[in-house]
Amino acid sequence: MKSLLQKLVSHQLLHLFIIWFSAISIIFEYVCGVSLPNNETVPAVIIFGDSIVDSGNNNYIDTLIKCNFPPYGRDFGEGNHPTGRFSNGLVPSDIIASKFGVKELLPAYLDPDLQIQELLTGVSFASGGAGYDPLTSQLVSVMSLSDQLNMFKEYIGKLNDAIGGKRTATIISKSIYIVCIGSDDIANTYSQTPFRRPLYDIQSYTDLMVSEASNFLEELYGLGGRRIGVFNVPVIGCVPSQRTIGGGIMRTCSDFSNQLAILFNSKLSFQMDLLQTKFSDARFVYLDSYNPLLHILQNPSKYGFEEADRGCCGTGNIEVGILCNPYSINTCSNSSNYIFWDSYHPTEKTYHVLSSLVLDHKIKDFLNHMMKLSNLKYLYVCPLLVMFFNPYVVTSISNVKSSFVDAIAMNFTFPSVIAFGDSILDTGNNNYLETIVKSNFKPYGRDFFGGKPTGRFCNGRVPSDFFAEILGVKESLPPYLDPDLQIEDLLTGVCFASAGSGYDPLTIERTTVLSIDDQLTMFKEYIAKLNEGVGEERTSMILAKSIVVISMGSNDISGTYFMSPYRRNVFDMEQYTSILIDQNSKFVKELYGLGARRIGILSLGPVGCVPMQRTIGGGTQRKCVGEINEACLLYNSKLYSSLLLLNATFPDARIVYLDTYTGLNAFVQYPKLFGFENGNGSCCGIANVELGPLCNSFVLKMCEDASKYVFWDSYHPTDRAYNLLSSDAIKKTIHQFL
């Protein structure tokens, strides 16, 4: 197996690095005239949000949402000092200010004792109980985002009066802004009150939240903010109170709240990408707290915790705010053993761990203004620096992702990649089957190595190949049924996927391809070959450390359910997606039983937006087919929830949800933002229905440059789209596999 270092050499990057290494310090100091990120100074940290980052503002307003009484603050400073922070001690606003080297504690703006010296280094405007939805703040009489923004304007006025407009402008532009809000919208306003659910479904409510978020961020930019980090909504369905209210007798995580959080987070991430494009002189940094907190909850002992599903205060199941008071019974003696302080908020220790997981690798993203594409002098004077650090320049170096360098730095390597599923991952197994579902003819594979058709439903490589390359294993993943495979090929992974496959047995009958049971049988055969070739001990190690990737379900939903009468007449979509999820869970459990421990499952993409579905069901405007996309989102939400349960069942496993819906949907809706020219049609063919045998050498029309298209044929993305999707999916989740 090639190591990451060998990969670098193969791309001639190491040679380039050595040539330039001795000049880097000189270039930085004398030519570029800028400092490295960790040498930059931040004048202030300014916070907006809810109780997670409120450092005491609610003490000074007329609301029941307060915590300025014991046992809150019992570990703050010298102890037993309630400050209005919803924790036993510090909250993220304090920790973030410290991380950026500003100060140890971030005061509440409404504190009447604040002096100008404290204002100069930042404050928190956050108010416990606030939300993106204006109704959230109204329901509990706290400060809305609009109120917080008005206070920020007042704050700017105070700075202007004290130190003048020029210095104020410098502070405002160079400060770090953190927005942490949204949990109360989902957990309380939408889930627990009757006011929003009759008016909004989950799609429209998350759209409302994202719209409010975008408006706030644009206003913040208009007031001079340029370094803006936004936390997504954490795994809110797993906080103790949500377990108690919505988790049934077993107090499991509330799937409904988590599904809402996932949907909102995907939309928020995309909206921030749009804002970054619109305001190129700013830095909009998406801060993922959902997955790190989930990882902590699934592996508490790894982080030194003993209790993960209830809080320290009282019973820990429902007490928060006024219910967590000096008279609460059985409050724990050592809060550092607990992930949660009360039934809603983490302990100070958790906040420290979480802040490090979320922020430490993101700090440079706030600071590197000199990496901007618009700053032309750095493109010409400092080409090496631009190539290595600019997040906006797409070069060959993008193939070496920072997340994977981080993985290697943690002394973890992945010996192989193993793929199961359908045409999204199939690298040629169907070539060796008696089926019409094939693509081993031109123009398929025209941009593959050597320009040859391989059985991949693409112009080049597919995600299974890109996963193998990104993880430093090999450039392409061979199909298991290739008769020319050697033991060396098997050691670094193979593909068992079969185009046309699905979880529903009826899907297989319609296409005569490999079922999941067939693929599992081949996997067992593969394990036997490894045992024979390298011994059981090394085989077990390979299986445990390899990345197993699964992509299946789109054929079941788009084909078997929506394009035939056999399932729709028996099951509604709620029932059918549950059947598919049950099959997925069963399959993952069987893989675990055979030794797999690192398993990534791809979500379904927006199948209603593929060219064929637009042509068949999108009307004269060829719109995306809404009911198919809704089915995919329903499936994805259930898939995510099922993976939570599997991770809880198998704590030594790393079972990871790989979101491809968000990225592909973004390509389709805004192709030009990602370098595509066509997001709704296919490169192969003229009628946007060409697929498999219909996409052949005699097709009436074939695009010249497939990289300008999101879709290669009427169902499958291009090599370039797959590359971007695969890189994004792994980059965002690599830490979950470790």
Image (cartoon, rainbow, N blue to C red):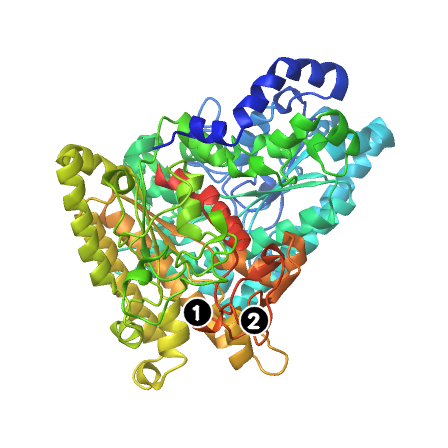
Q: Secondary structure at mark 2?
A: loop
Q: CA distance from mark 2 to mark 1?
A: 11 Å
Image side of residue 602 versus residue 623, left or right: left
Disc number for residue 88: none
User: Which residue corresponds to the image point at 55% horizontal and 75% vertical from the top-left?
Assistant: 614
Q: Quadrant of the N terminus?
A: top left
Q: Is residue 648 above or below residue 403?
A: below
Disc 2 and disc 1 in contact, CB within 8 angstroms:
no
* Residue at point 74%, 46% (across, down): 279
Give amino acid for label 1. Answer: Gly
- Residue 17, image x and y in percent? 57, 22
Mark 1 Cα-neighbour bin, 10 Å: few <14, some 14–19, many ≥20? some
Q: Amino acid at mark 2?
A: Gly
Q: Is residue 264 visible?
A: no
What residue does disc 2 label? 685
Say which residue label 1 marks.
692
Q: Quadrant of residue 455?
A: bottom left
| 384, 687: nearer the viewer | 687
Q: Is residue 644 visible?
A: yes
- Mark 2 and mark 1 lie on one chain; the one further toward the N terminus is 2
Q: Position of residue 283 (x, y in %)?
A: 67, 40
Residue 290 against residue 558 in the figure, above or below: above
